[in-house]
Image (spheres, rainbow, N blue to C red):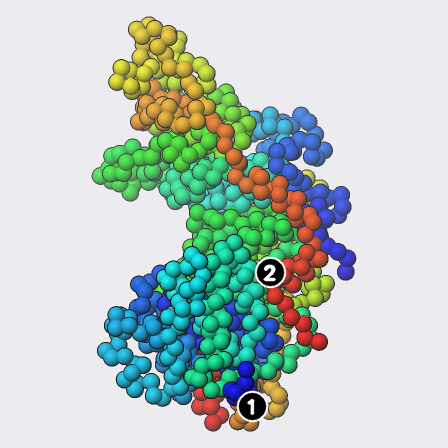
Amino acid sequence: MDNKTLEKKDRVVVRFAGDSGDGMQLTGSRFTDATAVVGNDLATLPDFPAEIRAPAGTPHGVSAFQIHFASRDILTPGDHPNVLVAMNPAALITQLTALEKGGTLIVNEDGFSAHNLKKAGYESNPLEDGSLDDYQLFAVPMTSMTVRATEDIDGITPRDAARCKNLFALGLVSWMYGRPTEPSTDWIEKKFADRESVRDANLAAFRAGYNFGETAELFAVHYEVEPAPAPPGTYRNVNGTQALAYGLIAASVQSGLPLFLASYPITPASELLHTLSRHRRFGVRTIQAEDEIAAANMALGAAFSGHLGVTATSGPGMDLKAETIGLAVAMELPLVVVDIQRAGPSTGMPTKTEAADLLMALYGRHGESPLPVVAPSTPADCFDAAIEAARIAVTHRTPVILLSDTFLANSSEPWRLPDVEALPEIDPRFATEPNDGDRFMPYLRDERLARPWAVPGTQGLRHRIGGLEKEDVTGNISYQPENHDHMTRLRAERIARVEVPDLAVDDPSGDASLLVLGWGSSYGAIEGAARRLRRERDMKLATGHVRHLNPLPGNLQAVLRSYERVLLPEMNLGQLSRILRSEYLIDVESYTKVDGLPIFTRDVMEQVEARLG
Amino acid sequence: MSERTNGHRSGNGHGPDADLGFGQPGEQAVSDGPVELPLTKADFSSDQETRWCPGCGDYAILASVQSFMPELGIPPEKIVFVTGIGCAGRFVYYMDTYGMHGIHGRAPALATGVATSRPDLSVWVVSGDGDALSIGGNHLIHALRRNVPLKVLLFNNQIYGLTKGQYSPTSEEGKVTKSTPFGSQDHPFNPVTLALGAEASFVARTVDTDKAHVAETLRAAAEHEGAALVEIYQNCNVFNDGAFDAVRAKGQKEQNQIKLVHGEPIRFGADGERGVARGSDGRLDLVDVAEVGEDAILVHDAERPEPSLAFELAHLAARPTGPTPIGVFRSVSRPVYGRDLAIELERSSSEAGTEQLRELLHSGETWTVS
């Protein structure tokens, strides 16, 4: 090919943006797969409207997909895109502010009709009025070139052809970054195997885009991003939802407990229901319940019957499940409650991320009703976090809340596949024998203060449990003042005794004065910021990540006290910092962000620079 | 580490002999464990002291259920009672079976979790008119619609007893209670028509103190495959005494109980002198048999696929204050929720282990770094 310059890059952030009907999520995920195959490290962030089909061409109908890929280990989908692909004026007007100054802007010129410009709110055409002079603008007539490329295909109307323009964009960007074409063409052939003309149109569009990049004089440079050095192993790309589903299946295999998921459709947790409902092969039973409350109760009923009971939802569903979770606290039964947090309150912004359900997870039930809370840190970590939540639930006979978020659920990264032989074993230790002479005491506890789990069908262990306060040991209903006091403290104590690994601190210089602490999906931004500041600014800072929000790691207080200052970025108004302040009387400095977007590396860097700069 | 499987029979936590019996659906549990037959009422009576108000209709129902249970031939450890909140919620503590006392209104959902995950169990829900029809109405209709294998006993006393006397969704219009000092304006539910509207495959009604009829109705419900709703008129002698006297009190019930028996002409009265017939306008009427002739009396058909006759019969009495049908209104066969799936899952999960997990994780596009 090459009369063109090949330029090497360490890392690139590309954002595809268009109308929600333009297929931008598909374009992004195809580009992601091709990128994974090249061996780049990567992280992605889909960003789409809540409306399935918002009015076409309007700013609130814009759907975007961002991918960050690099020749070294990266941790976030990136802050400012280097490249923005905008399929119409609405995509441009909403996404341009994110593009780095001087960045590459590729627009579908055909999308910039007077009508579309007006819908997006432009008074004049930005492609012509000089307002984009700060960027490297490439206006490409993608729609008409796609139509021309497909005009010889039988059964494809120009209107059908125009729908393939996203594949043209994919082809073009694939060329720019030297992505192999096979993963995309193979995918198209498989996807449209039974619709020949559609298959051919998409292939033609993809190739037209790729070839346009190679031949057009517009693009003088294309780029190469070399493979990232990664630990040996087999990898696949995974998003947080898939990883969570696989983690739950793994927990089922590791415990010998059949998996039972009951859920009510809700964004963004429905995807977990969809994913798990395909795995009957593993004995997974899924129920789409009539409502959130029913879903929680069905999962609890299945848990009573000896299954790994799981219910998954997002914020509004958590509100509704609260009473049932309290029942599980009283019944002391294993239950995994997955909360994929989204921006609230109320319906809020269903497709945007936030991590503001922490206090609800910890305290959002009436009475004293403590339970363990675990939060994954990255999309792939959702796998391990799910196993951990199930392990705690099963071995300690308690509901556990797994706090993921919209960002983790939707974004993806390469995942080094674990050795399944090395996964932790989960022993449900079902009760099979009477435990008090020839009698069975349902609340007689073991060394962990966990009660026996005797499932229906077991001879000699018939018992009744419920939400009324129970006498310890016998489980009989009790209104005794001393017993309630005892049981309340005991329920707190048994959760406090859940074994939790110590907080690991990364402090390469060993004498940092500032600790940046995180939980949940802020992990990538905090670690990414720390690496850059250490590498580029020679700054000394320590980082730590809290995975268990209840109970907290045993060494946490000592760690916090060993640093002069502690910075805690959160996607809420300071919920964990409030807890740490009240628990340890430590002056944690809170950085908060609640704009529905993840915490970015840049955000953390600015906060650290303000303190150490 | 050895190859693990996900099968219950070989799962962790219990020895090879401790088969917990997550058996196949339809495989009735009698043969499944060393049951000491015959079982008696005592086998189903827990050691807990019953704590309903003296004279409560719940005592009679409890005695009937405990007496009936041995008839099922199912060992008590294979039976699960699930209740909600209200006086009826206490029922679970008095049955010596497995039991869950859930939260208000949610018993059908809890029980759905039990019944669908363990088709080998016999699952019974006990609820009240407030629990099942007010706060828990959604779960009741969906459990009936799905045809989850649950036997739902709805104790209808037309009042809130546990909270001391507010009107319920089955109380009559104009009901004066603590919360409605000027009379309730609510139109009540008829539990039978509600269940029919929810596509229930089995709907019946009985009366708390009518021991033989309770047993007969429970038997029919137990034999029915799928969801069964049994409304039990239950007297609350403290807050709503006498609400069902017309069909419950000696001297009145003989005239007013219209006992529905599948395949039999619908006749009632002390000597069967009255009956139900279709009038010239197409509606059901209460008639004197002598007047219309025996041939004109409607023959009950609980197995009609469409529920219109059952619906009409349920509407014969807007309130149980005069002649009122009891017995099985509807009993039809349709697929039991989750049964086929249970067989499939049982088969597949017993084969799914570490190796299948590895395959799953490695599915899709992978690449290797060496």
Q: Which residue is mark 1?
A: A534
Question: Residue, x 48% and y 80% (percent of image)?
Answer: A215
Disc 1 marks a residue whose amino acid type is Arg
Q: Residue at x 52, y 87 (%)?
A: A3
- Residue B55, compared with residue A578, is above or below; it is above
Is disc 2 surrounded by few (<14), some (14 to 19) or many (20+) residues within 10 Å? many
Q: Secondary structure at mark 2?
A: helix
Foreground residue among B73 and B208: B73
Residue A462 coordinates in the image, percent (x, y)? 63, 41
The residue at which mark 2 appears reads as A246
In the visual, does A426 lie left or right of A147? right
Can residue B37 be seen here? The reply is yes
- Looking at the picture, how far across and down is residue A6, in whole percent? 54, 87
Nearest the eye: A532 or A385 = A532
Q: Quadrant of the N terminus of chain A?
A: bottom right
Quadrant in the rendering for residue B233: top left
Instruction: Determine whether, in the image, residue A559 is placed left or right of residue B283.
Output: right
